[in-house]
Image (spheres, rainbow, N blue to C red):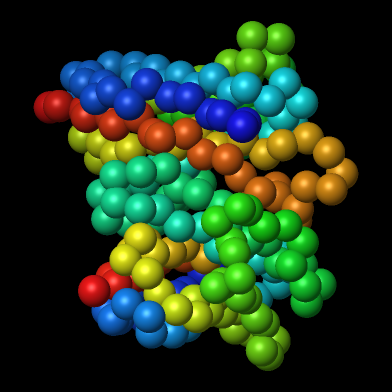
């Protein structure tokens, strides 16, 4: 059964450094999402991406964040200058339509 | 602020019992409702979704939606220890401009004891 994959599984970085989190969505899906979950808290929407552009973003998704689909398979989330409060699990999700979304295993980001 | 509220639990039920998980939402125009299961340290896994008022059954799971009361629930019949997890309610807002943004509740921890 096809699934969303994410790399790396765990990323440790120093505050102020840039990180890129990578995702490979399910191949025939057209809608792509990033969510995050701070330890012990709710899953929070960050951004949705469709037709090679951002379709919706939350107030969390400020100028330090960006997303890109550099080729036909990868979907990336870049955080330019990481802060301590960016430490969280980051989940990529994809969907064939705007309804059902399937989540990847996540990347645990630790900012020191 | 559109909210999704769940009783965080923990909810403890014996093996073989029915577990009932509840969720309320504030956006009356919401149109799609989802239940995800999340094991500790893992990602959310879609269990089922419901769009229309009433019940929807899938195996041991039944989702119930009451839009007038802004209430959605999940029943798990014949609960098994492997059902022990956090259950997340998620809501998709109304409107043609929505590209699928989901708003999640904080989750209900379910423990099924043998």
In the figure, B35 relative to A4: above or below? above
Image quarter of residue A70: bottom right
In the figure, B31 relative to B54: above or below? below
| Residue at the top extreme of this rendering | B69
Q: Quadrant of the C terminus of chain A?
A: bottom left
* Rendered location of residue A88, percent (x, y): 35, 61
Tally of marks = 0
In the figure, A46 relative to A54: above or below? above
- Is residue B59 visible in this depiction of the protein? no
* Rendered location of residue A111, percent (x, y): 29, 72
Nearer to us in this view, B92 or B52: B92
Nearer to us in this view, A105 or A77: A77
Query: What residue is drawn where x is 15% and y is 27%?
Result: B113
* Rendered location of residue A18, percent (x, y): 44, 84
Nearer to us in this view, B53 or A70: A70
| Residue at the bottom extreme of this rendering | A71
In the figure, A10 relative to B5: above or below? below
Left or right of A7, for residue B70: right
Query: What residue is drawn where x is 75% and y is 53%?
Result: B99
| Residue at the right extreme of this rendering | B96
Left or right of A12, for residue A74: right
Nearer to us in this view, A91 or A111: A111
Query: What residue is drawn where x is 39% and y is 34%?
Result: B107
* Rendered location of residue B40, percent (x, y): 26, 49
Query: What residue is drawn where x is 23% and y is 19%?
Result: B13
- Is residue B9 visible in this depiction of the protein? yes
């Amino acid at each position: 059964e096809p699934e969303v994959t994410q790399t790396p599984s765990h990323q440790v970085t120093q505050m102020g450094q840039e990180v890129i989190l990578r995702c490979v969505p399910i191949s025939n899906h057209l809608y792509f999402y990033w969510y995050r979950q701070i330890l012990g808290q709710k899953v929070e929407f960050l951004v949705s991406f469709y037709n090679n552009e951002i379709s919706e973003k939350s107030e969390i998704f400020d100028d330090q964040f960006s997303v890109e689909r550099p080729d036909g398979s990868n979907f990336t989330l870049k955080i330019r200058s990481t802060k301590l409060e960016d430490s969280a699990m980051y989940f990529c999700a994809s969907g064939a339509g705007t309804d059902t979304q399937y989540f990847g295993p996540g990347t645990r980001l630790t900012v020191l | 602020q559109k909210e999704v509220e769940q009783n965080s639990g923990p909810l403890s039920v014996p093996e073989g019992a029915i577990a009932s998980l509840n969720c309320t939402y504030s956006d009356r125009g919401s149109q799609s409702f989802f239940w995800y299961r999340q094991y500790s340290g893992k990602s959310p896994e879609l269990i089922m979704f419901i769009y229309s008022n009433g019940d929807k059954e899938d195996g041991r799971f039944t989702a119930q939606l009451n839009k007038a009361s802004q209430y959605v629930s999940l029943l798990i019949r014949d609960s098994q220890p492997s059902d022990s997890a956090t259950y997340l309610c998620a809501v998709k807002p109304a409107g043609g401009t929505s590209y699928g943004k989901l708003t999640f509740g904080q989750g209900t921890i379910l423990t099924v004891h043998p």
